[in-house]
Image (cartoon, coloured by chain):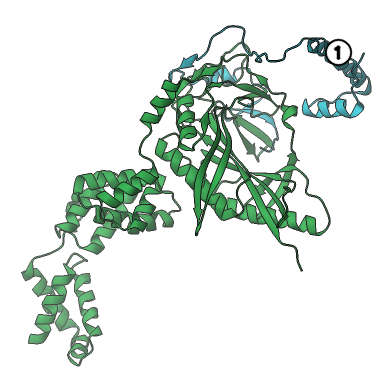
Amino acid sequence: MAKQYETVIGLEVHVELATKTKIFCSCSTEFGGAPNTHTCPVCTGMPGSLPVLNKQVVEYAMAIGLATNCDITQVCKFDRKNYFYPDNPQNYQISQLYLPIARNGYVEIEVGDLKKKVRIHEMHMEEDAGKLVHDEWDDTSLVDYNRSGVPLVEIVSEPDMRSADEVIAYLEKLRTIIQYLGASDCKLQEGSMRADVNLSVREVGTEKFGIRTEMKNLNSFKAIARAIEGERERQIELLEEGKEVIQETRRWDDNKESSYAMRSKEDAQDYRYFPEPDLVPIVISDEWIAKIKAQQPELRTEKLERYKKEFDIPQYDAEIITNSKHMADIFEATTAICKKPKKVSNWLMVETLRLLKDHDMEPEDIKFSPENLAKLIGLTEAGTVNSSVAKEVFEKIFAEDIDPEKYVEEHGLKTVNDEGALIEVLEKVIADHPQAVADYKGGKEKALGALVGQTMKAMKGKANPGMVNQKLKEMLKEC
Amino acid sequence: MANKISDETIEYVGILAKLELSGEEKENAKADMEKMLDYIDTLNELDTEGIEPMSHVFPVHNVFREDVVVNGDGSKDTLANAPLMKDNSFKVPKTIG
């Protein structure tokens, strides 16, 4: 009988914090500036420059630690991690090894019927490195230090996950918590959330862990799932052939759907960690912790409970909406204006999700304002526009955040409720389509649809469909 | 000298430091490192049982900055001494990140 294998996975998740400035200097962290414009002597490692810690970094890190049930290390400090690479101008990264800010936490995940805790070993603060862009033209690399010194927390889990589904559930849970705290936007595509996957396999029933590899360059949930499947198979194949798995870092190539070895993993001692002499220790008082706890916003679980009580929307809808803090904010703001939670939920659940999917966007990318969605709901409720026009207008709101009232006015999209005008059009449609009229009279109900369609077309979609139906039936009876 | 550095160790340290050493340089580096380790051994003669490791001489903690952008475009100064430059970036030998 073939051997059964179990996959054992632990994650190292890097999250870029949503501070305005870098961790150790007052340079902007804004994404997308021209290369090296957000740099200074500190974040480019110039001799004689000195780092000064951004207080907001400590507070975001504490908030994440508390929300993931960690113990806060009340006396913590930074350490130097030494390595040479062009993205790292100091030749060391300021990080935390000995006294990381948070330890011993957990988050609860749900996969199907399985509920489990994924333990967090530790979480530390550190600085990000610069960005290397490969220049195809002259086969060199170009270095941009705008990202150098952007604050990160690295969250290290215990090897508690057993499948790609569990990994994704864990990442989604972390992402939701951190977004709700406002500590990061956690966009995988843009790299503000990055996951390295540590994976090993072992025969089912064995206690001992197998030799693990670390996989990097995973920038979507799909890539993570594929990489886990691919690496599991690669390791099992090696073991089946009687070979050994080598402890190494591998880079996932999502286009080729395979990974390749980057370097054999350096041991912690190779980084020659030592206490960072340029930064003083951080002492976190009970009062400071209490203050951060008190500031903690409503998290997703609490929000879900409140939605159930406050708004009469289906549980499933509430779950999808609250899955993204941004979407939940839009839902609440729109509802506050128009007082129609069910309608708002419908626009988000149906049209918004469809458009996000069509454009390959995340809920965080939603740009439209609650005011404009509320106005559109007002227009449909008043019968000023019919549902197909409303959908068309919504696409405009989604894309450009237009004011629907103005747009409807300017493009003449108001539903025509004028009976006289409708009768005129109907008379013409009936006269022009004798066959359809005869079919309908002969008992073919379907022929009515064709006539309604012709009428809507003639009125450029602006007719009230209910009224067209009713009037048409009346007139057909008479003719 | 009490400490001995093996050929493998010096080779490995060279890789980590991204240094290529000639045979003679390796021997010299070995001797230097052995001396350094011996020196550290003298420190080990002290009894440090129960003493918290110290990372700072001064009893100062919690020195922070508020999260306010102060620095403007620093690219001119940053790139002033770049040996090679292209597109407002440092140009370096091909590196896969």
Q: Quadrant of the N terminus of chain A?
A: bottom right
Q: Please state the horizontal and vertical placement of residue A416, each as a whole percent of the image.
A: 13, 64
- Determine the residue positioned at 74% across, 33% down: A267
- Residue A167: % across, % down: 57, 50
Toward the bottom, the furthest residue is A442
Residue A89 higher or lower than A442, as above or below: above
**Which lettered chain is shown in green?**
A
Q: Residues within 10 Å of mark 1 (few under 14, many from 20)?
A: some
| Whether residue A31 is visible | no
Q: Quadrant of residue B68?
A: top left
Q: Residue at 38% across / 43% down in the picture?
A: A325
In the figure, is residue A107 to the left or right of A268? left
Q: Give, as a three-letter code, the residue at label 1.
A: Asp
Counting from the top left corner in percent of width and height, residue A313 is at 28, 56
Q: List the residue tagged with mark 1.
A: B38
* Of residues A408 and A166, the one drawn nearer to the viewer in this rendering: A166
